[in-house]
Amino acid sequence: MERFERTYEGGTWLTLGDSITWQDSKPYKEDKTIARGYQTLAREVLGFSEIVNKAVPGDTMAERDGAEGSVVRTGLAQDYTVDLVTIFAGTNDFKLGTPLGRIESERFDTTTFCGAYQTLLEHILKENPEQRIFLMTPLQRDKDGHTIDSMNKSGHRLIDYVEAVRSVGERYSVPVIDLFKESGLTKLNLERYTWDGLHPNDAGYERISRVIIGQLLAK
């Protein structure tokens, strides 16, 4: 990969999210082992000394009845004295029909996507007002009947969750890495860059990591 100046040399990177982020630390399935996820690829260029991967497969950003975990709850339990935090969630919220909600000024509903995102960001920024944070939008997908064109049981399309991430980032002046728009993964090439229409394979991680590295260095 192209070499950049290592502005994160020796730093610690906390990653929150779902299986797309979790895969960097463990194989998602025995016959679909991923050699290196986006964190490892970025680490090789940026020089982080430690990656704290707190992603959980299947997690939504929002809390759900009967579900053990969520990105918002995992995030609330972390220590925010690290050099970088990234949050990469939303595809499971879309698949499972999480209510989108709306951006509020107070009294956030953590069972909605926007409310959970606001709860987590406000917590992080109160814990450490100088914390460097990047949000990532969901990737385009075509898995389990849930595509960029389909509507979920809450009446939302994937783009609605993408736009919510963009809006939350704007509200809190937090940079957004728009992987939906800029990753290069579309329905026309998902067979090449994923192994199931959603989860990146090695070629997919290589491609999205280039976008992530560029954005982490640009802002």
Image: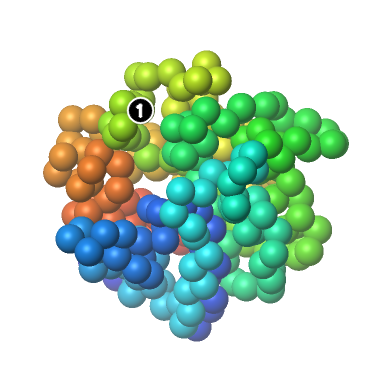
Report whether residue 176 is seen: no
102 lies above or below 168: above
Q: Nearer the viewer, residue 1 or 77?
A: 77
**Image spot of residue 49 (x, y percent):** 46, 82
* Tag 1 secondary structure: strand
Farthest residue, direction front = 66
Q: Nearer the viewer, residue 12 or 114?
A: 114
Farthest residue, direction left = 192
Colour mapping used in the image: rainbow
82 lies above or below 190: below
99 lies above or below 106: above
Q: Amino acid at mark 1?
A: His
Q: Picture quarter containing residue 22? A: bottom left
- Local crowd size for mark 1, using a 10 Å CA cut-off: few (<14), some (14–19), many (≥20): some
**Image spot of residue 63 (x, y percent):** 64, 43
Report whether residue 70 is seen: yes
Which residue is at 50% across, 54% downward? 17
Which residue is at 31% across, 26% downward? 145
| 206 sits to left or right of 58 | left
186 lies above or below 128: above
Which residue is at 20% across, 58% downward? 32
Q: Nearer the viewer, residue 142 or 205?
A: 142
Q: Picture quarter containing residue 3? A: bottom left
**Image spot of residue 51 (x, y percent):** 47, 74
Which residue is at 30% across, 48% downward? 199
**Image spot of residue 1 (x, y percent):** 23, 66
| 151 sits to left or right of 60 | left
Q: Which residue is mark 1?
A: 146
Looking at the rendered structure, the number of numbered marks drawn on it comes to: 1
